[in-house]
Image (tube, rainbow, N blue to C red):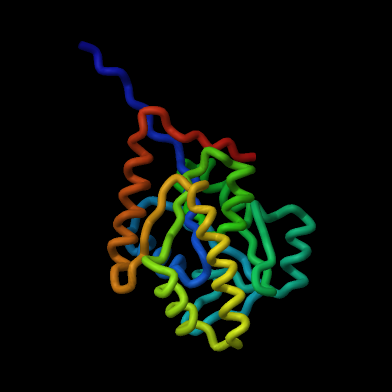
Amino acid sequence: MNIPEVNPAPPLLVVLSGPSGVGKDAALSGLKELARPWHFVITATTRPPRSGERDGVDYNFIDTETFLKMKQRDQFLECAQVYGNWYGVPRSSVRRALKNGKDVILKIDVQGAATVRRLAPEALFIMLLPASYAELRQRLAKRMSDAASDLELRLQTAQQELAAVSKFDYRVINRDGELDRAITDIDAIIAAEKCRVVPRVVQFW
């Protein structure tokens, strides 16, 4: 019996999304520690760094004028203004990695995920969820030093974003104290997708 030649699976474009405060940055850091052959796209932002964040590692921190020039030149796959700051995914970084056969991991908000879904519907969309609304409130309250009204705005936005979970391929729950489990779930999802009989083929321009 002749066994047909098995071609390597095409590269995936993985979109990791979720509401503010759900733990996307922490999950991404954990995924990097797995040392898989993935390319992590660094998002550009105009917001100031938080404590412990490093330029060129966590985000590319740039000024608003530079960001808007890049936006005008269509250098972002998707970009949006969120809570007064701009965020954008560099188009060239995604294109180059996919061309080189690497799976690409994007960490973006739910609004950005909707944009990528329109542009690359064959991407793999994973939403990170809190175990409960109360947990999310607690995380945001710990992280934010802003006024109570700003906290409520983020929570209202989070409710709207969580309602979009049905548009994602997978959901992963990030419970307090169980980040490792969430990271393991994301890793397993990507591994399973690489084994699909009919693979996802991302057409990227």
Residue at the image position 65 percent from the left and 68 percent from the top: 82
Q: Going 49% across and 52% down the picture, which residue do you hit?
A: 165
Q: Percent position (x, y) of residue 181? A: 28, 62
Q: Residue at x 41, y 66 (%)?
A: 130
Q: Residue at x 38, y 51 (%)?
A: 37
The quadrant holding residue 175 is bottom left
> Which quarter shows the C terminus?
top right
Between residues 177 and 163, which one lies in front from this camera angle? 163
Where on the picture, by quarter, is residue 81? bottom right
Image coordinates for residue 147, horizontal then vertical, percent? 60, 88
Quadrant occupied by the N terminus: top left
Q: Does residue 5 sit above or below 122 in this rendering?
A: above
Q: Position of residue 54 (x, y in %)?
A: 51, 76
Location of residue 94 in the rendering, given as x and y in whole percent from the top left corner: 57, 50
Numbered-mark total? 0
In this rendering, is residue 191 above or below 9? below
